Image: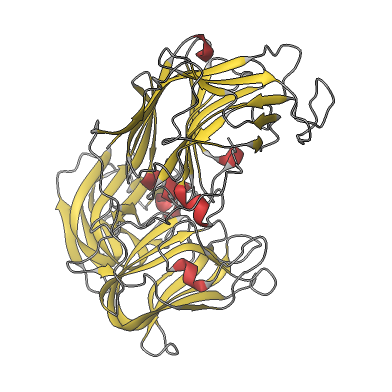
């Protein structure tokens, strides 16, 4: 849920947000929605396009004769790795799969005379723009019929020696946006390899077709791959073009069925300038890219900062607080900083300077919410008293400037508070927040949130520019009993490819980077984050306290540990 916080200003070093290019990513579906032709159709009810529409309930059926062909145009030459055929009862006993770069000269990828129908997954090796199925012997008296004809490949395949050529390079565009809705959304933002910044066309002149963005690689390069990470303002129809002089262009790739989100495109061309030339927008806005990464050889590349080292799970303990201080002592000042002042998100508490965060002498830290007015403060109107003066106090502490980390296993043993309007949380915020990166661009990882109105649920959620607040990615775990009834261990495994959330050692939710990038937006979690503990009351997520709210309420933390 949304947790836009106001934090004490601390000086921190901006950390690298970059990851090294992967030599070969997972294959991607290349054929869905692409132009397709067939030698024949049984009737208008069974068109060739039905075999590549992604709908397993529609199909292509041919006339009742041999041979018959079905051919898909992938839009550009692609490295091919797999073909999946989902046959209807009228299948091919004998057929071939072929590929071509020009639609005229064909290379065989697969051939059989003993097929048995059903779903066939065929691993192939080759390349081509066009892929063709030719049936030469029917298994029935009918024709050939396919629910789906799926061609896989591309997947970010690069060649030995390829490097990221576009990082830090200058760019130009048809227009750019720089206003309150998208400040500093300049062309260069598409090439900074920062997943939390983007280029967008101008809101006043750029919501038109065509719209384009060009990168200057600094010198002639052999280009083998382009990765586009789109904002929701993406191109349905566009071309990738290459040029030696920024004036005369050659098309590397063309599509009229762009799907947005992350597109990894295998291409082959030579030139100094690479351009995305959009001709049809996905909606009423313009064009916007979080990332436009070009890979190949040559050019004049700038080496990006190295990726953070990968963790090893379960890892070695690198930081902890066991809260073994004396009764009444505040949190260890070498590890934690108290945040003070009114909360945000329409919360009702005033955070004190550790008056509400004390160790209990028994190995715990207690963060207490209590009804206690703070004269001279201002909060949203308290529904119980009707006052706009903050009527509650609590505590919130963080490790910013004292400890931050990238990747690993983090865990805390916590007994949450639990009453109407209460909102305890254990979470991480990007350390670059303090060096000028606003929320949600800095990223947020909520390991545990609990709200009193849903006593049995513990929430784990991630937030980024493309998905935040109520649109954050995550899910609650139903413990089957009130979470506040006892201590629970809330944990996270985090690396460059995924996050897995745990309660009491049981993994209940895994969020994969590939899925996020291909369905929601950029992954912004490859840089340092710091720890936060707080116990809020009121706010957008839990709602207000009421007649059923019991105060004071304690959030009790046994320990916090980080392993790498």
Between 221 and 506, the one lying in front of the other is 506
Q: Is residue 36 above or below residue 510?
A: below
Instruction: From the top left corner, tell me how far across and down residue 236 is, in percent.
Output: 52, 63
Between 73 and 293, the one lying in front of the other is 293
For the point 53% across and 13% down, the residue is 484
Whether residue 523 can be seen here: yes
For the point 40% across and 75% down, the residue is 169
Q: Identify the coloring.
A: secondary structure
Direction from residue 459 to residue 75 in the image, left or right: left
Direction from residue 416 to residue 125 in the image, left or right: left
Between 63 and 57, the one lying in front of the other is 57
Q: Is residue 73 above or below residue 393?
A: below
Instruction: From the top left corner, tell me how far across and down residue 533 is, in percent.
Output: 50, 30
Q: Quick one: quadrant of the C terminus? A: top left
Instruction: From the top left corner, tell me how far across and down residue 502 is, in percent.
Output: 38, 25
Farthest residue to the right: give it: 386
Instruction: From the top left corner, tell me how far across and down residue 556 is, in percent.
Output: 49, 17
Q: Residue 71: which quarter of the image?
A: bottom left
Direction from residue 450 to residue 94 in the image, left or right: left
Numbered disc total: 0
Q: Is residue 92 above or below residue 157?
A: above
Q: Is residue 222 above or below residue 195?
A: below
Q: Residue 7: which quarter of the image?
A: top right
Whether residue 255 can be seen here: no
Direction from residue 545 to residue 118 in the image, left or right: left
Between 498 and 180, the one lying in front of the other is 180
For the point 85% across and 25% down, the residue is 386
Q: Quick one: quadrant of the N terminus? A: top right
């Amino acid at each position: 849920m949304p947790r836009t916080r106001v934090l004490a200003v601390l000086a921190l070093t901006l950390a690298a947000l970059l990851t090294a290019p992967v030599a070969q990513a997972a294959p991607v579906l290349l054929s869905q929605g692409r132009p397709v032709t067939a030698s024949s159709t049984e009737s208008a009810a069974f068109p060739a396009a039905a075999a590549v529409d992604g709908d397993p309930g529609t199909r292509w059926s041919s006339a009742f004769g041999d041979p018959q062909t079905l051919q898909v145009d992938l839009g550009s030459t692609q490295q091919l790795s797999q073909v999946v055929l989902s046959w209807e009862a009228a299948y091919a006993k004998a057929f071939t799969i072929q590929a071509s770069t020009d639609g005229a000269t064909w290379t065989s990828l697969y051939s059989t005379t003993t097929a048995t129908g059903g779903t066939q997954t065929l691993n192939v090796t080759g390349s081509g723009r066009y892929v063709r199925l030719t049936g030469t012997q029917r298994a029935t008296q009918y024709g050939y019929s396919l629910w789906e004809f799926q061609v896989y490949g591309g997947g970010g395949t690069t060649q030995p020696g390829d490097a990221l050529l576009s990082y830090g390079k200058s760019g130009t565009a048809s227009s750019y946006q720089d206003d309150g809705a998208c400040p500093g959304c300049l062309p260069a933002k598409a090439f900074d390899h920062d997943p939390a910044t983007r280029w967008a066309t101008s809101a006043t002149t750029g919501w038109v077709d065509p719209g384009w963005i060009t990168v200057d690689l600094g010198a002639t390069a052999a280009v083998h791959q382009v990765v586009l990470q789109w904002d929701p303002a993406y191109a349905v129809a566009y071309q990738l073009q290459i040029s030696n002089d920024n004036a005369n262009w050659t098309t590397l790739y063309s599509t009229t069925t762009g799907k947005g989100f992350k597109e990894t495109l295998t291409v082959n061309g030579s030139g100094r300038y690479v351009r995305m030339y959009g001709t049809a927008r996905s909606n009423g806005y313009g064009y916007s890219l979080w990332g436009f990464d070009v890979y190949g050889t040559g050019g004049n590349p700038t080496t990006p900062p190295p990726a953070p080292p990968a963790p090893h799970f379960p890892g070695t303990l690198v930081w902890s607080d066991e809260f073994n201080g004396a009764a009444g002592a505040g949190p260890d000042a070498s590890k934690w900083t108290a945040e003070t002042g009114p909360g945000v998100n329409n919360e009702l508490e005033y955070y004190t300077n550790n008056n509400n965060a004390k160790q209990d002498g028994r190995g715990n830290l207690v963060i207490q919410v209590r009804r206690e007015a703070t004269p001279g403060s201002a909060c949203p109107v308290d529904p119980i008293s009707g006052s706009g003066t903050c009527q509650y106090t609590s505590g919130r502490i963080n490790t910013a400037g004292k400890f931050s980390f990238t990747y690993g296993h983090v865990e805390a043993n916590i007994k949450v508070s639990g009453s109407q309007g209460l909102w305890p949380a254990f979470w991480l915020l990007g350390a670059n927040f303090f060096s000028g990166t606003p929320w949600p661009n800095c990223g947020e990882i909520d390991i545990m949130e609990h709200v009193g109105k849903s006593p049995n649920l513990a929430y784990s959620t991630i937030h980024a520019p493309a998905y935040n607040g109520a649109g954050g990615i995550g899910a609650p775990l139903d413990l089957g009993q009130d979470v506040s009834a006892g201590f629970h261990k809330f944990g996270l495994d985090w690396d460059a490819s995924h996050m897995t959330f745990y309660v009491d050692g049981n993994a209940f939710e895994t969020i994969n980077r590939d899925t996020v990038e291909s369905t929601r937006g950029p992954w912004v979690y490859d840089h340092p984050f710091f720890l936060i503990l707080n116990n809020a009351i009121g706010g957008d997520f839990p709602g207000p306290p009421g007649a059923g709210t019991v105060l004071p309420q304690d959030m009790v933390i046994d320990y916090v540990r980080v392993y790498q």
